[in-house]
Image (cartoon, rainbow, N blue to C red):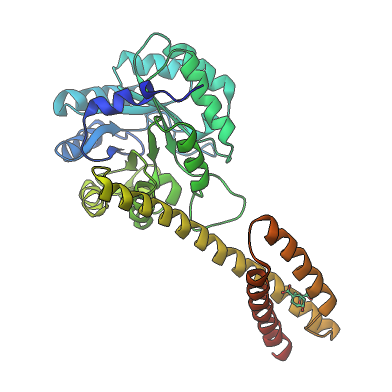
Amino acid sequence: MENSKEMRGWLDNLGLDHPLVIAGPCSAETEEQVLKIAHDLKDTDVTYLRAGIWKPRTRPGNFEGVGALGLKWLQKAKEETGMLTATEVANAAHVKLALEHDIDLLWIGARSTVSPFIVQEIADALKGTDKVVLVKNPVNPDLSLWLGGIERLYSSDIKKLGVIHRGFSTYEKTKYRNIPEWQLAIELQNKFPDLPLICDPSHITGKRDMIFDVAQTALDLNFDGLMIETHNDPDNAWSDAAQQVTPDTLVQIMKDLKIRKESDAEAEYNNKLGMLRAQIDIIDNGLIDTLGKRMKISDEIGTLKKQKNVAVLQSKRWNEILGRMILEGQEKGLSEEFILKMFKAIHQESINHQEKILKA
Ligand SMILES: C=C(O[C@@H]1C=C(C(=O)O)C=C[C@H]1O)C(=O)O
């Protein structure tokens, strides 16, 4: 698959002067709820009203969506407000029903993107239609699997495409519900600059108070739009209550976000600088995180040393590390002087940590 301007035709045709916004409840719950949210979002920057109709849940027994009935509510919301509609589909039957109810945009969820069989089934069911299809990243951080999903659709003649970055699953607990591997999205953008890239900060964060920050990072990294779960009564939502915001909060978020436009040379410079700095910020956070983890391990070694009455400084081990890191540094274009300075500082901090434990 080659990059093609055709992929973003649907987005350009909307003629927006701001990032695309897709908003609405995690799940359609009742007709009143869908219509209320639609009316609240009608005169905002929101273009597509989203609502989950069939909810893929991690474990059985949770609310699994209202089913086809909810599609009628979305259709009614479109009639009453003129908003376009969007929902998730996970098999051919869903696609058929969504088409019958004139849903404008369909997305393939993270759990479906992992399965080439499901993506192919959806692609086949969509053949010959002109719907916009967005592919969420697979749950695991695998760029080729994500791209494979897009390619399947593209080769089935679905040309109105886009991707949604909703973060990735990790075994380790982090502050995110799904960790945003931004480098992966950046790589995807480099390969396919005309493939619309949407960020879903609701699923990345899992918490409404972190949404703004992640949305700003996405815009700093040149994302084309945002999908944000919005509910009239988030705390009592039937699914994903903690990550939904009210329509008022959504409007405030949109107002506070800094949107970088490429209009003249100066703006282009600032835009590029902003994007590069956002990348550096992500890497710096990673460095601190890694150093914190290294010190925790050093603490554990300190505890062992205390039990066995062993000295903190282990020169042989330390010299081995230094020698290896100087060589690795050379390969990455880092000077010996820098590596020495940096690792001496790290070693000192590690010794301080262990000293504290041995003296306790
Ligand atoms: C962590 C240890 O203790 C000290 C700290 C080291 C480090 O931070 O890499 C290495 C050797 C020791 O001087 C260890 O003994 O492995």
Q: Quadrant of ligand 1?
A: bottom right
| 91 relative position to 216: left or right | right
Image height of 115 relative to 296, above or below: above
Name the side, left or right, on which 32 lies relative to 119. left
| Residue 247 position (above or below residue 3) | below
Residue 289: which quarter of the image? bottom right
Q: Position of residue 183 (x, y in %)?
A: 51, 46
Q: Position of residue 161 (x, y in %)?
A: 40, 24
List x then y, in percent, for residue 325.
72, 64
Q: Is residue 292 visible?
A: yes
In terms of image quadrants, where is residue 344?
bottom right
In this view, which residue lies farthest toward the bottom?
359
Residue at 33% across, 41% down: 226
> Height in image: 32 above or below 348?
above
For residue 89, above or below residue 288: above
Q: Which of the pair 195/141 is nearer the observer?
A: 195
The one of 185 and 106 positioned closer to us in this rendering: 185
Query: Count of labels shown?
Result: 0
- Farthest-out residue, top: 128
Residue 73 shows in this picture: no
Instruction: Locate residue 273: give its quadrant.
Output: bottom left
Q: Residue at x 36, y 43 (%)?
A: 222
Q: Quadrant of the C terminus?
A: bottom right
| Picture residue at 47% right of the left edge, 58% below the top | 280
Q: Residue 214: x, y in percent? A: 39, 52
